[in-house]
Structure formats: structure tokens, C-alpha cells
Amino acid sequence: MPIIEAEFLDLTQGLDLAAFWAENEQCLGFTVDKPRCAVSFSPDDHWIFEFMAAPSTIRYYKDKAYRDQIHREVNSVTTQYVGRAFFDEDTFEHSPKRIENLFGSEFLYLEASTPWLSHVTEDPDEFARILDRAEQTDMASWALPDAFIAEWEARKRAGKSLPKLGGGSRGPATVMTQVLNPQVAILWMIDYPDLMGRFRDILAQKMIDLNQTLRAFSANHEPGWYILDDNSALFNRALYRQFCAPVLQRVMNVLAPAGARRYQHSDSAMGHLLEEQYALGIREVNYGPEVDAALIRQKMPDALIHGQMPPFTLRNGSPDEIRQRMIEDFHKAGQGGGLIATTAGSLAAGTGVGRMRWFMQVVQDHCRYD
């Protein structure tokens, strides 16, 4: 059974879903010339599994029909109670290669878990050979498996809408600490800086090549780049500047030139890296709950902040705790119009539609400009 918290349904009996989302469309710009703060939600596969008590996570990833059915069931509930469908009901069976695959990292599927990318080696000599192979790989011929191309063409012939590819990816901190064990990666940055510097440089170039290939294939001509980099917090400032920032700068110079969207998501406590992020031209952010909204606004005065409700506060907090935290964040970061109210990181598994409705109600009542 889906998670529907009766207490919060009682508190939101007067919430008009159609009117809420119609007003929300008028609230997205970085300005106070709008009715209120905008709201967004980001439920993902972790959230689905607990929300629906899904019996098999492996089957969800391996069986398209099963996955699409779960999505239909979830969308039916969220449409009824929240006014939004969040999940694709006709998912792809196949996919392009990921940048991690270039370095030999592949997904491991375990029951009751989301997929994990494998670590490729703890031998620096072997890793040097892996980098040799990656450097020599032609991304245009490698990135798109035949099965994916066939599925794409079948959808195209059927007149189905097709996604724009190549708009973003995992960031360098997360890629490096998934291809390699995180402890190994950090230690090698100290003990083998030339090897890891080569990893950095190959990663940057191949990330550009991969996503230019994806953009050309899907006729995606929209500049901009999103970064999903949860493991940023593992890096101190010096290591981030040496091994991560150069990758992002090179990639965004090509794929998100000046004026284009540069967005960073990270569930982690990366408040110590805000200056580095700002220097990279990142102006749209969704950081973890340990990063205070006032600090983000201080360090990134013109950034559009997606946040900063702690996911576990929304999942576990009382109505008063949720309301007070949202009001505090609005006063800290939303007074100039640059806040989109959402969770600081992904929507926590176990959060039900009643609490989502309460969040909407709180923003509607207490985060207004009109």
C-alpha cells in the first residue's frame, strides 16, 4: 500500500491542487514579482521502493513491463493526492553507455537495493592500463549500443516523443569515487598525483566527447549542464580544486558556455566548497541539509537555490516543525525571489503524499510575495 498519512490529509483538506500548480507556473523566476515561492519535488527509485513496498528491486531494473506498471501505480496515487505524475510510464529498456563504463565500472544489482557501480581495481599499474584503454576509445562508436539505437529508431517510427540526451551527468567527485574505492581514490591523489591527474584529464575530455555524441544523436542543441555529485563532500578544498574543478570547468566551457544553465545537485555536506562552486559559474544549486540556506545565499548571492528542507524533517517531523523550518529557510534565502522550495537533496524514502501536501500548503500560506 502507498504511504498516505491521514493526519496530514486532514490538515490539507482545503488544498486546491489544480489552483496550486497553476499558480506555481507563475512562480519560477528569480524575482519577487510573483505570487509566492515555487515548489518542486524529486522522488526517485529509492522513494518508489518504500512508497509502494515494491517486492523486487532487481525486477524493477531488469523488467520494463514491471517497471512501467509500478510507475503507473505510483502516478495514479500522486496525481490524486499531489496533482502531479512524476514517473515515465513507457521507460526505455536499453540505454547509452555511462562515463563510468569507459573505465570498466559496471552496475551491480542486489535485491532490496538500488544499483551500485563496481570499483575497478586497487592496483595503480592496472589502473594506468585502464586509462590507456579509455584514452584510446572512440566515444562516437562506443557510446550507443546497437540495442539502444534499435529501440530509439522503433520509438521514432512509432511517433513517440524522444528525450534530449547529453544535458548532464554525475560529477567528477562521484565518478572518481565510484570507479575507484573512495579511500583508494583519495590516497592516490596524494601518493600518485600524476596518475590521478591523468584520470582527471581523460575524464574531462571523454565526458565532453560522450555528451557531444549524445547531443548530436538526439538533436539536442540546448546549451547547459547539470551535475549530480553527491560525493563532493569527500574532498577538501585543495583536492577539489586540483582534481574536480578542472573537469567541471572544461566540460561546462564546452557544454554550458557563459549564460547557460549550470546546476549542481549534491546530497552531501559540501558547504566548504561553495566558493569553488561559485567560481565555476554554478548559479543553480541543490545541496544537502547540512548546508545552511543563509550560508548558500551569503556565498552565492545570485544563485537559484533549490532547498533547503531537510528530507528527514519532511518525512519524520511534526507539522509545526516542517512549517517552522520552511519559514526559516524562506527568510534566509528566499527574500529576493531566488528560492524554489524543495528538499535539500532527494525526497527521502518513506515520505508519503500527505506530507508532500502539507509542504505545499505551508509554502502557499507562508512563503508569499503578493
Image (tube, grey):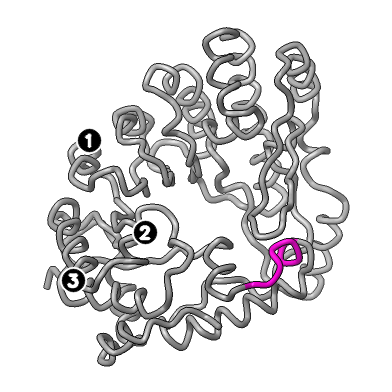
Query: Do the numbered discs 2 and 1 sit on residues whose CB atoms are within 8 Å?
Result: no
Position above or below: 140 against 24? above
- Asked if disc 3 and disc 2 are in contact, CB closer than 8 Å, the reply is no
Q: CA distance from mark 2 to mark 1?
A: 23 Å
| Residue at image mark 3 | 320
Helix, strand or loop under label 3: helix
Image height of 71 relative to 188, above or below = below
The percent position of residue 128, horizontal first and vertical second, equals 74, 14
Q: Say if 265 sits above or below 156 in the image.
A: above
**Real-space CA distance between mark 1 and mark 3, rounded to the nearest whole angstrom:** 29 Å
Answer left or right for 303 relative to 328: right
Residue 57 within the segment the image draws in magenta: yes
**Residue tagged 2:** 311
**Viewer-nearest of labels 1 and 3?**
3
- Along the line of sight, which residue is nearer the eye, 67 or 153? 67
Asked whether, in this view, residue 322 is left or right of residue 120, the answer is left
Q: Using a 10 Å C-alpha cutoff, classify the residue at mark 2 as few (fewer than 14 neighbours), some (14 to 19) or many (20 or more).
A: many
Residue at image point 52% right, 10% down: 190
List the residue tagged with mark 1.
299
Give 60 or 33, whichever is nearer the viewer.
60
Of the two numbered discs 1 and 3 on the same chain, state the one appearing first in sequence.
1
Query: Could you tell whether 152 is left or right of 43 in the image?
Result: right
> Image point 56% across, 41% down: which residue?
170
Q: Residue 318 location, x and y as percent?
A: 25, 71
User: Pointer 1: residues within 10 angstroms few (<14), some, or many (20+)?
Assistant: some
Specify the amino acid type for callout 2: Pro
The amino acid beneath tag 1 is: Lys
